Image (tube, helix red, strand yellow):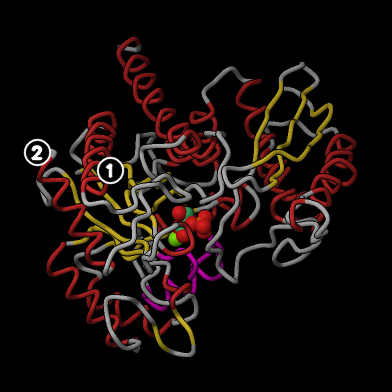
Amino acid sequence: MSKIKRIWSYEILDSRATPTIECVCLLESGVLGVYSVPSGASTGTHESLELRDKDETRYRGKGVLKAVQNVNEVIGPSLVLSGIDATKQSEIDAKLIEMDGTENKTRLGANSILSVSGAVCKAAAAEQKIGLYEWINKLAIEKGIKAKMHIPTAVFNMINGGLHGAGNLDFQEFFLIPASTKSFSEGLRIGAEIYMVIGQNLARRGAIHSVGDEGGYAPNLFTNADALEIMVEAIGQANYQVGRDVFLGLDVASNTFYSDGVYTIRDKSAPLNEDSLISYYKELNNIYHMAILEDPLYEDAWEGWKKLKSILGSQVSIVGDDLLVTNIKRLEKAIQNDSCNAVLVKPNQVGTISETLDVIKKSYDANWKVMVSHRSGETNDSFIADFAVGVGSHYVKFGAPARGERISKYNRLAAIEKELLYKNESSK
Ligand code: 2PG
Ligand code: MG
């Protein structure tokens, strides 16, 4: 047990050359916890506030010096003064929420608040000399989550479109999902092998094969469905079978191609209304048997989501990201409304570890699938991998099996997989 001695933070860069905040929590024992906060590009309107300086003379307005100042001058000193022990995560998070006092963390910023919540969490694990995932598992159990630690199934984003791509695709993420019967390391190998083949095929055809924000290829293609076709082709060439070894999925991030009641995508010559878009998803699902469909409709289309869930929900995990924004009230509404059957969990959408755990508990209680997620702007921090193992989520989504900030998370899962195995063996 150790009290917090000092908390400080500073600006660092994320994978898009955009500033973000890194926070250090120093305990009286001398132990440190260091955590950096990711940042989204296709953000939901209802997310908590990511505080940016808006000073156009620095980093084109994207600096986070105000958030840094909030940690160094407000949050840090107040926690140190309270003499609180770093293992009291939920009390600390309650203090952070109270210090901010607004619905969407608009006073102090969710980025400054989460930086402290995460750094404290890491320091507490280090202090107790246990794995971060083990500590998070204890916190989850404390919250009433009956989750067993395990390595979730990876959801690889092989092709990047939308706001993450340099190409012309409307859909944001084209998923390759190893069968859940595979071990994590088998799944990682399958993902990487297919990733290599997709790259070779794109290069052979002269299509752009540079990568987007999440490490997936960002080609120019005729339609979004063509990207699925390219994946199917590569899966076969790599000697795997769709529906047996791997499954397909999409995060279409439909907010980005929705405007004034219609959805505009390059697969169709005219804009689609809600019903026609749902029919198109049905069509795609008949061909590609998708395991996951994220953000199929825009973030406030509550009735449409319900309709889509009733049509595809028995076959597909319908994931709410921009719809739910890791917000317990929106989650409760979605459960009542039967809008989807899976939740995307991003701690920075809400701002504290404890609130994130509350959302996971509610989702498990509703029998929903949970997918723990990175953001498109990331650092090499692998906290989110430990978090996913600790809460025992079904899926994790950390981008493609390529690029440092993505593989730092997948590689961390590979390390935990072995750690769990050997710890288990030696306890027998
Ligand atoms: C998403 C995320 C992560 P962003 O839409 O699911 O892949 O993207 O971080 O840009 O919101
Ligand atoms: Mg999404």
In this rendering, position of residue 204 left or right of residue 396: left
Please give the label number shown on residue 99: none
Residue 386 image offset from top left, x and y in percent:
48, 34
Residue 152: x and y, percent? 34, 40
Dividing the picture into quadrants, the one containing residue 428 is top left
Which region is colored magenta?
Answer: 320-339
Which residue has dot 2 on it? 239
Residue found at x 83% / y 56%: 57
The residue under label 1 is 199
Of the numbered discs 2 and 1, the one sitting upstream in the chain is 1
Helix or strand or loop: what does disc 1 sit on? helix
Three-letter code, disc 2:
Asn
Amino acid type indicated by mark 1: Gly
Spatial CA span between label 2 and label 1 = 16 Å
Q: Is residue 362 shown to the viewer in this render?
A: no
Tell me where residue 414 sits by quadrant: top left
In this view, the residue in front, 29 or 171, is 171
Disc 2 crowd, CA 10 A, few/some/many (<14, 14-19, 20+): few
- Magenta span includes 331: yes
| Ligand 1 within 8 Å, label 1 CB | no
